[in-house]
Image (tube, grey):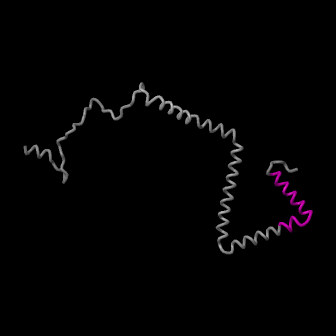
Amino acid sequence: MNTETDAMNQTVGEVPVDTKTTDPLDMSLETPGTLLKIQSPDRPLGSPELREQLDKALRFLVLFPDYLNGTLGEYRKPLSTVGLILLAGLGLAVADGVLDRLNSIPLFAPTFELVGLGFTGWVVVRYMLYADTRQELLQAFEEVKDRVVGKEAG
């Protein structure tokens, strides 16, 4: 009886180890164990309603790239225009934020006002004061407009 108790309560270091196992392991080498039981293809997965919803979702995911390519191809110009307008708005917002920060620095706001007034005065004297310089400005404006629109300058 003493040997049975000693066999049950062997110690490894300070931790007691129970050598008598209560749950025997199936260690048959002839038949391998199964870790995951795969459902048979004969039985459907879940209810028919669930299967129908899954089929719809998979069909949408498979056909989504085709829908996207068709939509982008059809509406390429309007989407580009909207994108450019959004980018211009974002650029204006960033520029406004930068200018607000610069205006908060002492002496920057009055300097910007002086530069703006000086440039306005130069444009008035250079292009707006005389009739021939107004014609020159109008001609330069037409050339730029034709380049932007895509007409050949002739």
Residue 49 x/y as whole percent: 48, 30
Q: Residue furthest left?
A: 1
User: Magenta: predominant secondary structure element?
Assistant: helix
Q: Is residue 117 above or below residue 135?
A: below
- Residue 137, percent across and down? 86, 60
**Residue depicted at x 53% and y 35%:** 57
Residue at image coords 71%, 47%: 81
Residue stretch rendered in magenta on the structure: 123-147
**Residue toward you, 139 or 71:** 71
Residue drawn at 80 percent across, 49 percent down: 149
Q: Left or right: where does residue 129 sit relative to residue 93?
A: right
- Outermost residue toward the top? 42
**Could you tell me residue 103's position as x and y percent?**
67, 70
**How far from the left and from the top, in percent, is residue 90?**
66, 56
Q: Is residue 98 magenta?
A: no
Name the residue rendered at 66%, 74% in the picture: 106
Q: Nearer the viewer, residue 23 or 60?
A: 60
Magenta stretch encompasses residue 143: yes
Left or right of 57 in this view: 2: left
Query: Closest to the observer: 110 or 66?
Result: 110
Above-or-below relation of 6 to 56: below
